[in-house]
Image: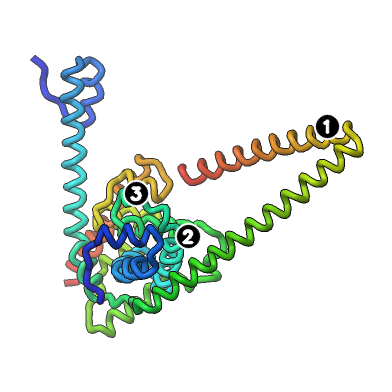
Amino acid sequence: MNAYVPEDPAAIRRAVRGDERALAELLQNNYAMLYRYMLKVTMHKAMAEDLVQETMLRAIERISTFKAKSKFSTWLISIATRLYMDEMRRQGRERKWQTAEQALQAIRFETSMQQAEWPHALDALAEMPYDVRVPILLKYYYGYAYEEIAQWLDIPLGTVKSRLHNGLSHLRKELKEDEDAANGIR
Amino acid sequence: MKTRRTGFDNEGLKKGAGDGERQSLRHMEASDGGAREEAEAAEFRELLGDHLSRWDERMEPPVPRLAALEQLVSQRKGELSRKLWRDLLLLWTLGIFIIGSVLLILQWNIAAFAGLQAAALIGAIVYLFVLARKERSVKREWTT
């Protein structure tokens, strides 16, 4: 069920015209992709689930405006990114969500339950400010264009580029320090 | 003979360049930018790519059943449709009330009608001005 399903243009046209089953199928096919994206972006399981559901509701509301100029999955990612940025900008979010550290701890715990390793590199990504982590993931992991990222984050193109550059430098430095510390102990 | 300069020196070269040179400089800049972008992407893959891919594979998204999503779509569309009709009804009621009141004032006293129209016009201009200022300040806040 979680495997990637290629987009069917005919199904998208039917969904845009109001076919509820076609839209439900599109949402189901993209659910796993969207959840994975949101969990990496938020580093917060409850917030990721909440935002995925909110994205689904927005997609249902606005499906008639989808022009198919981009992929359906890209459209969902753009909605989800905007919702996340709005959520983080809004005041009083601290009361609604558990702290970032608690949320990350929960993800680490779940990973250890799966007998898997939680690398320091992912901690370094989680510790970055959200407005740097989001463009880094969108650009380098998902391969979106600078222009798309600037539009979704509502920031100038130059700001996207500088956040990417500074974010990557920060990651490099963090991971190098970690490596040096590990070598020093040995 | 001109020496080929790259990086920060390009700006100086650009000022004295002709059309053909400018075009080739743009190509050089684009390829420099493309190469840098590719180098940064490669570095990211090296630092985090494998870790993120493995985490992706381990994640178990709670994908809802198709029937549940169909119900959600149907329910949401119903809610939206009801909201649209409610808003439309409210708009018509308000419109009829305002037009009725304005017509009554016109019948009662033409000077009061003109005063009301002028006040409404000034109010609209002030509202648009305040809205435009607010939008500008929000844009500034998020783009700096």
Amino acid type of the residue that numbered disc 3 sits on in the rendered structure? Ile
Give the side of residue A122 with respect to residue A127, left or right: left
Q: Which mark is residue A183?
A: none
Which callout, 2 or 3, points at the residue further toward the start of the chain? 2
**What is the x, y in percent for residue A153?**
41, 50
Depth order, front residue of B132/A96: B132
Q: Residue at x 62, y 41 (%)?
A: B131
**What is the x, y in percent for residue B129?**
65, 36
Q: What residue is disc 1 on?
A: B114
Q: What residue is disc 3 on?
A: A149
Q: Mark 3 lies on which chain?
A: A
Depth order, front residue of A80/A132: A80
Amino acid type of the residue that numbered disc 1 sits on in the rendered structure? Ala
Q: Residue furthest right?
A: B108
| Secondary element at image label 1 | helix
**What is the x, y in percent for residue B105?**
87, 40
